[in-house]
Image: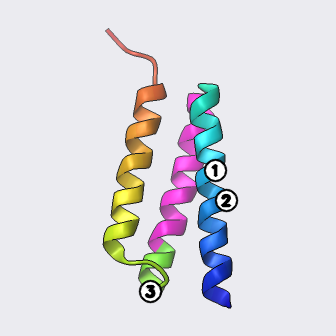
Amino acid sequence: MSNKSVLTGLKRQQKKLHAAVLSGDTAKAQVELSLLASSLDKAAKRGVVHKNLAARRKSRASKAVARTAPKSA
């Protein structure tokens, strides 16, 4: 049962990040990305999720956050 709560927490964190990205709030998205990455790393370390799954989700999340960042000339 503890794995289910960890997975639910990861899903909730991803939804928060997705909402921040859609709103265009780069600062909030960065904070949510940091929290999600930490949660994914902990889950992978404990064996709740596979390490490649954690790496893939972190990569996709960071790409999404990078797209919200303003373009610097």
Say which amino acid is labelled 1: Lys
On residue 40, the disc is none
Q: Residue at x 48, y 67 (%)?
A: 40
Of circles 1 and 3, the one toward us is 1
Q: Quadrant of the C terminus?
A: top left
Q: Residues within 10 Å of mark 1 (few under 14, many from 20)?
A: few
Residue ID at (66%, 68%): 9
Quadrant in which the N terminus appears: bottom right
Q: Earlier in the sequence, mark 2 or mark 3?
A: 2
Dot 2 corresponds to which residue?
A: 12
The spot of residue 71 in percent (x, y) is: 38, 15
Mark 2–mark 1 distance (CA, rounded to whole Å): 5 Å
Q: From what the image shows, is residue 44 above or below residue 19?
A: below
Tell me: 64 left or right of 8.
left
| Secondary element at image label 1 | helix
Q: Is residue 53 above or below residue 15?
A: below
Query: Which residues are drawn in magenta?
Result: 25-41
Query: Label 2 neighbourhood size at 10 Å, few (<14), some (14-19), many (20+)?
Result: few
| Disc 3: which residue | 47
> CB of mark 2 within 8 Å of CB of mark 1?
yes
* Identity, as a three-letter code, of the amino acid under mark 3: Gly
Q: Give the labeled residue for mark 1.
A: 15
Per the image, label 2 sits on a secondary structure element best described as helix
Position of 36 relative to 61 (above/below)? below
Q: Is residue 31 magenta?
A: yes
Q: Position of residue 47 (x, y in %)?
A: 44, 86
In screen coordinates, is 55 left or right of 12?
A: left
